Image (cartoon, helix red, strand yellow):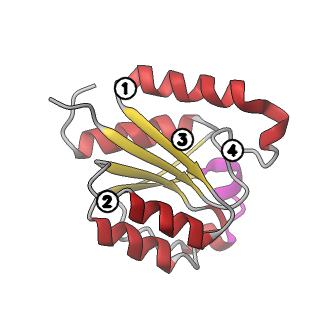
Amino acid sequence: MSIVKIAVLNGPNMNMLGVRETEHYGDLQWKSIENDLTASFNVELLFYQSNHMGDIVDYIQSLYEKVDGIILNPASFSYAGYPILDAIKAIGVPFVEVHLSNIFSRKGWHAQSIFLEEAIGVIVGFKHDVYALGIEAMLKHLKIKY
């Protein structure tokens, strides 16, 4: 059986830690989280973050037939991200929507997410734990034991 490949996509101003200042934490901590998640679930993770919707759409299109699922933190694209939603639907893979609890609790655009009805699940969590919960949901959906 081949290893499950999951893309982890982050919208504007977000990263794996759920903070805006990526440079403050540095690549080593980011890589540590990626390694922990990869080892914990025995999956291959492809991380991508952009502040530009067009770049995210292009990246999603490049994933056609390359991934089994997507973990999506749409950030401020939650309400206006129709091109992102269309791109995910076009490549035909399931996706889980994740939000950071400190941002989700502010309501606003997150409460009106366009992704809710199409996602196989919506996870609200704290910092990088939200990605672990998203991966768990995806693996359950794919009926993969971890």
What's the CA distance linking mark 2 and mark 4?
27 Å
Q: Secondary structure at mark 2?
A: loop
Name the residue that disc number 2 marks: 64
Q: Is residue 111 visible?
A: no
> What count of labels does the image hold?
4
Instruction: Tell me residue 95's x, y (percent).
Output: 37, 56
The magenta stretch spans residue 105: yes
Q: Secondary structure at mark 4?
A: loop
Q: Is residue 21 left or right of residue 84?
A: right
Q: Amino acid at mark 2?
A: Tyr
Pointer 4 and pointer 1: residues touching (CB < 8 Å)? no
**Precedes in sequence: disc 4 or disc 1:** 4
What's the CA distance linking mark 2 and mark 1?
22 Å
Residue 61, image quadrant: bottom left
Between 70 and 63, the one lying in front of the other is 63
Residue 133 sits above or below residue 7 on the image: above
Q: Amino acid at mark 3?
A: Val
Instruction: Tell me residue 119's x, y (percent).
Output: 37, 62
| Mark seen at residue 41 | 1
Name the residue that disc number 4 marks: 18
Q: Is residue 119 left or right of residue 65?
A: right
| Mark seen at residue 130 | 3
Write down the region rendered in magenta. Answer: 100-108
Q: Amino acid at mark 4?
A: Gly
Locate the C terminus by quadrant: top left
Residue 121, image quadrant: bottom left
What's the CA distance linking mark 3 and mark 2?
25 Å
Query: Local crowd at mark 1 within 10 Å, few (<14), some, or many (≥20)?
Result: some
**Precedes in sequence: disc 3 or disc 2:** 2
What's the CA distance linking mark 3 and mark 1?
14 Å
Pointer 4 and pointer 3: residues touching (CB < 8 Å)? yes
